[in-house]
Image: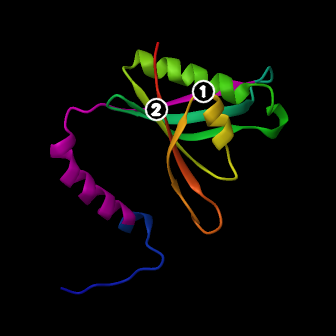
C-alpha cells in the first residue's frame, strides 16, 4: 500500500473520505433523525439582518452558525433567534442543545441564555480558546 500526503485536497477527494465514513457509521446510527433548519431575521426591506443555522440530530439541537448584522446588534436579534430556534427544537423533540464558540466570539451571550461551558480547548487554533456549551431545553 502506498501513502500520499495532499496539502490541498479537492472537494472530490474530501467527499471520498466523508462518504466512506458515512457508510461505516450508518449501520450504527440508523433511525436517528437528522434534520437541518434555519431561521432568519428579516427587516422591512426584506433583507436578512441575521440568521441561525442548526441541525437536529436525535434529541440534540446542534447550533452551527449564528450571525447578526452589525447594524442591528444590541437590539435582541440574536436572543430572539435563539429563543425561537430553541422553541422549534423542543417541538421537534430536542432535549439538549450544543454550541461552540471561540473566545473572541459569543461565550457571554450564550451563557446569558442559560448555556453552560462543558469544555474549553486552549490555544485553539493558536491564541484563542474554543468553548463547547450545552443547555437543557424545556418547554
From the top left corner, tell me how far across and down residue 65 is, in percent. 57, 41
26 or 76, which is in the foreground? 76
x, y percent for residue 119: 48, 50
Foreground pick, 64 / 10 = 64
Say which element carries label 1. helix
Residue that extends furthest to the left in the rendered view of this protein: 27
Q: How many numbered marks are there?
A: 2
The residue lying toward the viewer, choosing from 3 and 105, is 105
Q: Residue 58 appears at what percent x and percent y?
A: 31, 31
Q: Is 21 left, or right, of 49 in this rendering?
A: left
Q: Quadrant of residue 93?
A: top left
Residue found at x 72% / y 26%: 77
The residue stretch that appears in magenta = 14-42
Q: Quadrant of residue 35?
A: top left
Residue at the right extreme of this rendering = 71
Q: Quick check: 56 left or right of 23?
A: right
In the image, residue 29 lies in the stretch drawn in magenta: yes
Secondary structure beneath dot 2 equals strand
Residue at image position (26%, 57%) is 21
- Residue that mark 2 sits on: 97
Q: Residue at x 27, y 84 (%)?
A: 3
Amino acid at each position: 500500500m502506498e501513502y500520499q500526503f495532499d496539502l490541498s485536497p479537492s472537494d472530490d477527494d474530501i467527499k471520498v473520505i466523508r462518504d466512506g465514513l458515512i457508510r461505516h457509521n450508518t449501520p450504527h446510527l440508523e433511525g436517528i433523525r437528522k434534520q437541518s433548519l434555519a431561521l432568519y431575521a428579516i427587516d422591512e426591506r426584506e433583507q436578512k439582518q441575521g440568521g441561525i443555522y442548526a441541525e437536529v440530530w436525535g434529541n440534540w439541537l446542534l447550533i452551527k452558525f449564528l450571525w447578526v448584522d452589525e447594524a442591528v446588534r444590541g437590539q435582541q436579534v440574536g436572543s430572539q433567534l435563539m429563543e425561537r430556534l430553541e422553541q422549534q427544537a423542543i417541538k421537534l423533540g430536542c432535549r439538549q442543545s450544543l454550541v461552540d464558540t471561540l473566545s473572541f466570539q459569543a461565550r457571554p451571550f450564550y451563557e446569558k441564555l442559560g448555556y453552560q461551558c462543558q469544555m474549553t480547548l486552549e490555544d485553539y487554533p493558536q491564541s484563542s480558546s474554543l468553548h463547547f456549551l450545552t443547555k437543557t431545553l424545556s418547554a
